[in-house]
Image (cartoon, rainbow, N blue to C red):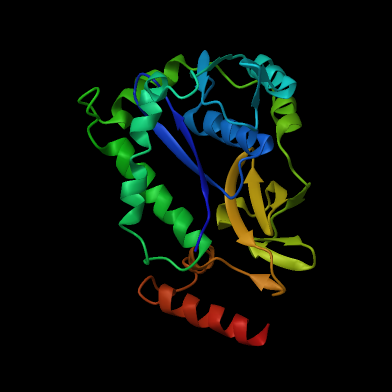
Amino acid sequence: MFVLQVFDYKLGHSRYILFIYRRSKTQQDVIDCLIESFKTTGGVPEEILFDNMTSIVSFNGGHRNVSNRMIQFAKDFGFKMRFAKPRSPETKGKVETANKFMSRLKVYDGDFETESELINILAKINKKVNTEVSQATNVPPILLFQKEKELLKPLPSKHVVESYLGYDRTTRVSKDSMITYKNAKYSTPPKYIGKNVSLKEVNGRIAIYFEGIRIAEHEICDKKINYLKEHYVELLRPLVNDDDVEAIAEENLRQFDMLL
């Protein structure tokens, strides 16, 4: 059984949406997901409508209190915060419609065994939603997004962005496409070899970020070498025949598991 949180970020004009996987829904998770959304879509909108998530909003006698850190975050990134009326889903209907993705996810019940496989399934669903014709616009979101992203405002300076991300530390990706954390190695996509990345540990997992975008995530374990299969296949591809690379990768990873 997997217990998961999915952060929904949707642009109002194009209906272009991002589903971002999380194991928790803390205020830091919300900030990390917003920054990842801004980077992925290429900018910051003028205004964001929030659900009344308890990580950033509390109610006292009917009065809404917004976290001071979130208020400062909005100011530093240059967007206005709006909030949906409590118990009034119609005020955030664009996102509520996107939440139908749960019915899409149920199709894959029993088709995955690891968290990484589940994250890949969510990415497939995300891509499908953005390429299907929207009932509201009669156009696939990805097409309208090409114009809408031109209207987004640029992110603040790298220094401001980095000040909000909850990293534990930074390190450099080695030639074997791995980083070292707590005496074990964890893989990244090979294109990040030689790049400086940031690490964040949450609930027994290590997330790896490059310039604010999550590029890999692993369960922290006792094994000394931890490759995700897709990273290892990509690393091997220039060295072996394309027809053999999958089989060779599986065998090598099996040998790693036996030895380590």
Q: Could you tell me which residue is drawn at 69 percent across and 28 percent down?
A: 161
Quick one: 16 or 224, which is closer to the camera? 16
Tag count in the figure?
A: 0
Give the quadrant of residue 216.
Answer: bottom right
From what the image shows, is residue 63 above or below residue 97? Answer: above
Of all residues, the one furthest to the left in this rendering is: 138
Q: Where is residue 110 in the image (x, y as percent from the top left)?
A: 37, 67
Quick one: 236 or 133, which is closer to the camera? 133
Position of 199 compared to 50: left or right? right
Give the quadrant of residue 108.
Answer: bottom left
Q: Where is residue 26 in the image (x, y as percent from the top left)?
A: 66, 39
Q: Where is residue 66 in the image (x, y as percent from the top left)?
A: 67, 19
From what the image shows, is residue 153 above or below residue 10? Answer: above
Quick one: 138 or 1, which is closer to the camera? 1
Of all residues, the one furthest to the front in this rendering is: 61
Q: Could you tell me which residue is drawn at 61 percent across and 87 percent down?
A: 258
Position of 98 compared to 74: left or right? left
Q: Could you tell me which residue is drawn at 51 percent across and 59 percent down?
A: 2
**On-image quarter of the C terminus:** bottom right
From what the image shows, is residue 188 above or below residue 96? Answer: below
From what the image shows, is residue 234 above or below residue 33? Answer: below
Q: Position of residue 54 (x, y in %)?
A: 62, 31
Position of 166 compared to 12: left or right? right
